[in-house]
Image: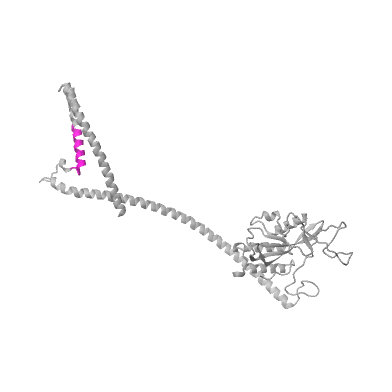
Amino acid sequence: MAPPPPPAVHSPSSNQYTQQFLSNVLSQRGPSSLPYSEDVKWLIRQHLVSLTDTCPSLQPKTATFTHNDGHTVNLLQSDGTVPMAYQDVTYNIPVIIWLMESYPRHAPLVFVNPTRDMIIKRQHPFVNPSGIVSIPYLSNWVYPSSNLVDLARNLSHFFSRDPPLYSQRRPNPNPNPHPPPGTSFSSSGSTRPAIPPRMYPPSPYGSGGGGVGRIMDDPSEVYKRNAIDNLVGKLHSDIERLRKVREADMEGLFSAQGVLRRREEELSKRVKEMLDEKEGLEHQLQMVLMNTDVLEGWVRDNEAKLKKIGNANGVVDADEVFEPCDSLSKQMSDCTATDSAMEDVIYSLDKAIQDGAIPFDQYLRNVRLLSREQFIYRATASKVRATQMQAQVASMASRISQYALS
């Protein structure tokens, strides 16, 4: 546990000692460090310094806090009194403000700290019998706007409306017409709030016999304190300047990080487009290779045939150039040729009947016979075409699988 800060005397020197104390305890590392987030320690220090400036009696220190499950942790607290105006008289309510591990994102834990001569008012609207304070400001705590100075002002306001502590009436074996300090009674016998006088811890430099907390006037001590004050002031100036430089550097790094993220998204988009284009080109390449293989095979198969059908003069008969590659193609060629021939014969019969070259009954008989045969050939050609299509699809599927495996 860190040593307590200097006396609760509102002066520039005590303010510097408070700042030095908070800087020391919040900068500790290792097992003795306080369990606060590193990114909010500067805000905790600012809250406590502002609270000490506003309410000098509330001095920060470290203490051990025990949770309900028995777990103990070393935390910061502000221990002192909060002023309260009641019936035109100002009283001081002793309180302890614990800064929990999640502070300042969550509200602190506030207790009233009655002395042995005080009791907590029963059924108080803002203080339970165990001393825990629950005013609306704590319930509506908002990070980062809420702070300890406004909390102290709200405590003073709500305690003035309804004091949470009262003094106890104790029998006095030696009646004295003058009541002891800190306790007062009305003529009707009722009690009124009574708060002990404000107490300050002794000075770390010792005290004289004429008063409490008076600093020694030894010149060497004065020189030492002045040197420490100057050193602390320079240190805080350097820390503030370094903090501003680091904040500027962080802003620049955040900006660079944003630019890099945008570039990363753009590059990812372009890479995806290139991968899609590569996949399409690979598919087209497979189709080209397959068609090239088909054409090269056809050329190889027909080069020898071209040499056979050519005569001595090198003239090729056009009718003998093409020949069916299989039985289905030959059957398809025969059906198509026969169909075309029958179509020509029917056309010639139409011309002959128009010119009167043949009798009409002979024309009808020949057309009926030719039409019947033409229908048979056309039906056969349709079936052959369907069979060829199925065979072609099966051949293409086998070739695609072959290229995919290669």
Q: Residue at x 75, y 57 (%)?
A: 156
Image quarter where the N terminus lies is bottom right
Farthest residue to the left: give it.
312
- Answer with the quarter of the image where residue 357 lies: top left
The spot of residue 30 in percent (x, y) is: 59, 70
Q: Work out whether residue 351 or residue 377 is closer to the camera in this orientation and state it.
A: 377
Relative placement, left or right, of 100 versus 393 is: right
Q: Nearer the viewer, residue 171 or 336?
A: 171
**Which residue is at 19% across, 42% downward?**
327
The answer to whether residue 284 is visible is yes
Q: Look at the image and tell me in which quarter the C terminus lies.
A: bottom left
Q: Is residue 355 magenta?
A: no
Residue 123: x and y in percent read 75, 55
- The answer to whether residue 163 is above or below residue 238 is above
By secondary structure, the bulk of the magenta-drawn segment is best described as: helix
Q: How many marks?
A: 0
Residue 326 part of the magenta-drawn span: yes
For the record, the magenta segment spans: 322-341
Q: Quadrant of residue 121?
A: bottom right
313 versus 32 height, above or below: above
